[in-house]
Amino acid sequence: MYVDSHCHLSFPELHARLDEIRAAMAAADVDRALCICTTLEEFESVHALAMAHDNFWASVGVHPDNEDVMEPTVGTLCEWASRPRVVGIGETGLDYYRLNGRSVADMEWQRERFRVHIRAARGTAKPLIIHTRSSSEDTLAILREEGGEQAGGVFHCFTETEAVARAALDLGFHISFSGILTFKNAADLRDVAKFVPMDRLLIETDSPYLAPVPYRGKVNQPAYVPHVAAQLAELKGCSAEDIGRATSANFERLFKVAEAA
Ligand SMILES: [Zn+2]
Ligand SMILES: [Zn+2]
């Protein structure tokens, strides 16, 4: 019924409890999940999850926050993306939230890394999983410069304005909402969610982070994604099951999981 389109099950706090997490997913009608890669060093363990379980898939990419890690090339990303059950490129993008004393100009390495991912996504015809924080203008500008609309993809864990959502939708991208949508102080974001069309919506947990209400502050897991669906249902005036069906169909279409199975 529900798909968690973005989670980090290779992270130790979740990986150590995988049996329990899979049982909780089944009990909550969360039948599928996309396991997201954040470093090349981590890729084999993310990929192993997708190879071991027929309801998990994997991505390949290097998160913009990760420094002192292997730097991806277009060649490596394309090669690893061609392995079975790898359905997306990312997570990638820009994050100017923690500059650690640097200026935006100093973050050229992030912008270059993002360009490499877009080129790989175009080269493999796999969608981009985009992380953008305090950097939406540059994220959109680089996507346009690099022809990112030819690859398409998703703006994950969306926390930006309606104007940014509109620009992402105009480029053909999907918008994914996380547990943040359920937070008390997220009224503006709930207004943005109302505006995103049903056929471009995805839901995610971004576990182990950002557990939705009523689990806020706890370790997140895919079994909690129906709480995001329930919040969206309230905003859209439909049932959580309707959101589950729509976001699952969007997931299948965007990531072409049937072909990757
Ligand atoms: Zn992210
Ligand atoms: Zn993530």
Image (cartoon, rainbow, N blue to C red):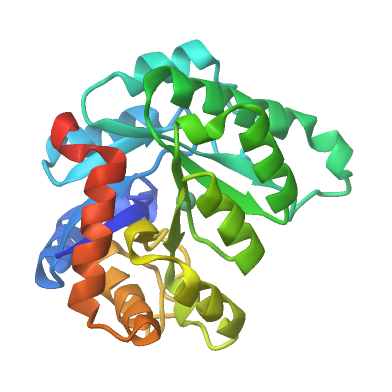
The image shows residue 131, relative to residue 84, as above or below, that is below
Whether residue 116 is visible: yes
The image shows residue 180, relative to residue 73, as above or below, that is below
| Whole-percent x, y for residue 166 in the image | 58, 59
The image shows residue 245, relative to residue 119, as above or below, that is below
When asked about the image quadrant of residue 77, the answer is top left
Which image quadrant: the C terminus?
A: top left
Which image quadrant: the N terminus?
A: bottom left
How many numbered circles does the render carry?
A: 0
Residue for point 24% across, 63% down: 246
Residue for point 71% across, 32% down: 111
Please name whichever residue, 57 or 23, is drawn nearer the observer in this view of the structure. Answer: 57
Single out the residue that lies furthest toward the top: 75
Please name whichever residue, 208 or 136, is drawn nearer the observer in this view of the structure. Answer: 136
| Whole-percent x, y for residue 236 in the image | 36, 81
Whether residue 67 is visible: no
Please name whichever residue, 150 or 25, is drawn nearer the observer in this view of the structure. Answer: 150
| Whole-percent x, y for residue 157 in the image | 49, 60
Residue for point 38% across, 20% down: 124
Residue for point 39% across, 60% down: 207
| Whole-percent x, y for residue 226 in the image | 26, 74
Please name whichever residue, 204 or 12, is drawn nearer the observer in this view of the structure. Answer: 204
In the figure, is residue 115 to the left or right of 241? right
In the figure, is residue 203 to the left or right of 160? left
In the figure, is residue 108 to the left or right of 7? right
